[in-house]
Image (spheres, rainbow, N blue to C red):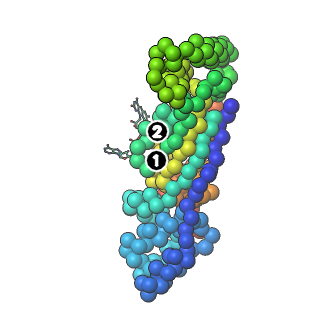
Amino acid sequence: MSLKIYLVSRPCFDIDVFLSFLYDQETSWTRSTNITAPEEIVETAGRVCYMSFGKNQSPKTNAEYIQHLIQMEHESVLEHVNWSFLLTGVSRAFTHQLVRHRVGFAFSQLSQQYHDEKDAEFIEPSQLKEFPNAQAAWQRAVKEVKESYNEILKSLEEFETKVGIGMQKRESRRAIHSIARSILPNATETKIFVTANARALRHFLKIRGSIPGDQEMRQVSAELLKYLKVEAPSIFCDFDTNLLPDGSPVIVQVDMADTSTSK
Ligand SMILES: Cc1cc2nc3c(=O)[nH]c(=O)nc-3n(C[C@H](O)[C@H](O)[C@H](O)COP(=O)(O)OP(=O)(O)OC[C@H]3O[C@@H](n4cnc5c(N)ncnc54)[C@H](O)[C@@H]3O)c2cc1C
């Protein structure tokens, strides 16, 4: 099974409501053209801080405005825009690292206590292809673990009458799965619903997307960046994807001053 990312929700800007605010404030706004909703939300959030509308509006384009906010580290404005991604074909090792991100993220992950993992798949590190002996050992190990998992589940069929006396069925199932899952490896495939704001995503890409020794993390970061570059190019314009000598992606961050901001 390979990595697949679904973008399931994105920011929506209600321009009519915002224009009614400007009308109430007896001011106006020169909008940039060809920009996305998240870019517009970030710009307007920034402008509200200074009420830089009407005669107070600088000639900056939306892209220039956002990049100026980021350069000034006025980054709380980036927290107004969130995306939800559903990630499949990722390993538990990857998600264990992902969920360490405490700020600006929300997670909902497949439970190994409620979900039966008897048909679990395992995420094979792509570099193993170059090492047939290691790959064979890896494949043998996950096959054995799956067989053992199923054997443990089967052997625990009498759990309710022996140990879980008086437990509700749901709780005894949870207990059985908890025992069996304790042998599942980091490579076990999982699914995770992730919501994050633009500031948190920038932080994630910066610190996680560039680690040479973490191929899966770089792969996911690069796939997320592909979406984000379409969703809000100005907010992620200083991130780029290069390739390492083995052809795998790595995220690089360039100086905002070096990015093309003419939009
Ligand atoms: C190369 C690398 C190696 C790592 N190795 C290990 C390891 O061996 N063991 C391990 O346990 N973890 C390890 N981590 C995880 C790391 O310590 C972080 O838990 C994880 O990357 C989340 O980063 P964060 O705290 O910056 O993000 P978030 O939790 O999203 O926080 C974002 C930012 O908010 C601020 N912040 C959040 N919480 C606090 C707080 N309580 N107090 C002050 N400021 C706060 C910080 O500025 C932080 O950068 C590693 C991470 C990397 C990138």
Label 2's element?
loop
Residue type at mark 2 is: Val
Secondary structure, mark 1, is: strand
Q: Tag 1: residue type? A: Phe
- How far across and how far down the image is residue 195, in percent? 52, 49
Which is more N-terminal, label 1 or label 2?
A: 2
In space, the residues marked 2 and 1 are separated at their CA atoms by: 8 Å
Q: Residue at x 53, y 38 (%)?
A: 109
Quarter holding the N terminus?
top right
Q: Residue at x 61, y 51 (%)?
A: 8
Q: Give the residue pinned by disc 2.
A: 99
Considering depth in this image, is 90 or 222 the residue closer to the camera?
90
From the viewer's perspective, tell me whether residue 103 is left or right of residue 214. Answer: left
- Queried on whether the Cβ of the residue with tag 1 lies below 8 angstroms from ligand 1, the answer reads yes
The reply to whether dot 2 and dot 1 touch (C-beta < 8 Å) is yes
| Residue where numbered disc 1 is placed | 105
Ligand 1, by image quadrant, is: top left
